[in-house]
Amino acid sequence: MINWRDGVVRSLGRSWPGALELLIDIAGGPSGVRALAYPELVGSPEVGDRVSVTTTALTRGLGTGGYALVAALPDRLPADPPVGAGHIVKARYTPLQTMVLGVDEQESAHHELLREADDLAGLPVVIADLHSALPAIVAGARLEASRAGLAAPRVAYVMTDGGALPAWFSRTIGALREAGWVAATITVGQAFGGDLEAVTVHTGLLAAALVVEADLVVVAQGPGNLGTGTRWGFSGVSAGEAVNAAAVLGGRPIASLRVSGADARERHLGISHHSMTAYGRVALAPADVAVPVFDGELAPLGARVAEQAALLEAAPAGHRLVRIGTEGLRPALAGTPVRMSTMGRGLDEDPASFLAAGAAGVHAVRVGAER
């Protein structure tokens, strides 16, 4: 069941592309509750508006970013949108299902381009478990391009539906787009709200190559991944499936490892069991596994990572381990347009997480230079 509440908008807060923060007073409940609205879905709230919000995850302390979520402005419903192209429904059969124009559907200007498309022509595709890896991967790619005297790569982000469904929830996407670090976001599966919409990871990858004309693609779920502490019950399993999609289309899959030196859970220390399972068991096609080489105070962790990575080299898919030095990466990570954060830890608290993702970006540019 959903926890429904009525409230009144007290004030408007920050906004970013597709999202607006509010403070609301809950009827018969607490005042000054943070809420989030997606104007494309519910309209634009104003001070004094009555809002219907859902608080189920907030009440349980789960990953909504600490927000009540606005479901409707019951006294001021938005006007019907004009009839236009597009018939793909996402968040299907939920009360907030939304209709979008898919880049790959018949009414799209790109349909003919994608109708028989079947080849990524060796395009580097970096696959990551967590959304927080995205800025680090791009930072690593931009650093390597600069060191090689190359232009910064044109990056497309393919967002899968393992975490947040609306791309608008991510402040990271908006900041990277504004800074020119990401050229376009393509939301696939049930995810929506990207610059382009696609039905599957496969058509999302092809759109990244042919429509966005990207030099590099990053595939990861949106913020708010799901895990149950079991071998198979985590949304990052899709990282292995993305390796298969990139490979079957003739891309160059590059596995970004989820690494931590600060996670209190043994199963996530060094290389997370999420990466070990997704790449070692789910991926059936070979990928380049970007293995970060740590030195200094991170050297003992680096030894653990190298030992774990050897198991991926022996996996049935026949992955190729590529050891990437991390010299110069940390200053590049500190200079990103967004604050680095993963599982509540920043760059200083868990540098290995971001260095590992940055290493995958470094390797992607090297692969791209060989095309």
Image: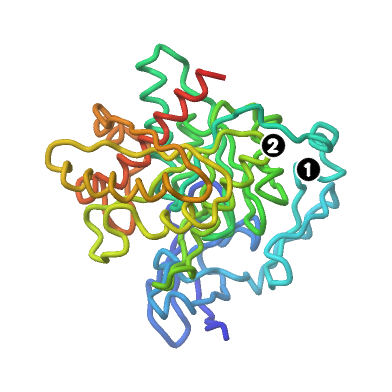
Judge depth for marks 2 and 1 and give the one in front: 2
In the image, 248 versus 235, the foreground residue is 248
Tell me if residue 70 comes above or below residue 291 in the rendering: below
Q: Is 8 situated left or right of 260 in this image?
A: right
Tell me the quarter of the picture where residue 23 sits.
Answer: bottom left
Contact (Cβ within 8 Å) of mark 2 with mark 1: yes
- Return the x and y of residue 350 as percentages of the image width and height: 24, 50
Q: Which residue is at 35% across, 57% downward? A: 272
Which of the colour schemes (rainbow, by chain, secondary structure, one colour) is used?
A: rainbow
User: Which residue sits furthest top?
Assistant: 149
Q: Is 45 situated left or right of 145 in this image?
A: right
Secondary element at tag 2: helix
Residue 247 in sight: yes
Secondary element at tag 1: loop
Q: Which residue is mark 2?
A: 206
Identify the mark at residue 104; answer none if there is no mark: 1
Q: Is 189 situated left or right of 165 in this image?
A: right
Residue 19 in sight: no
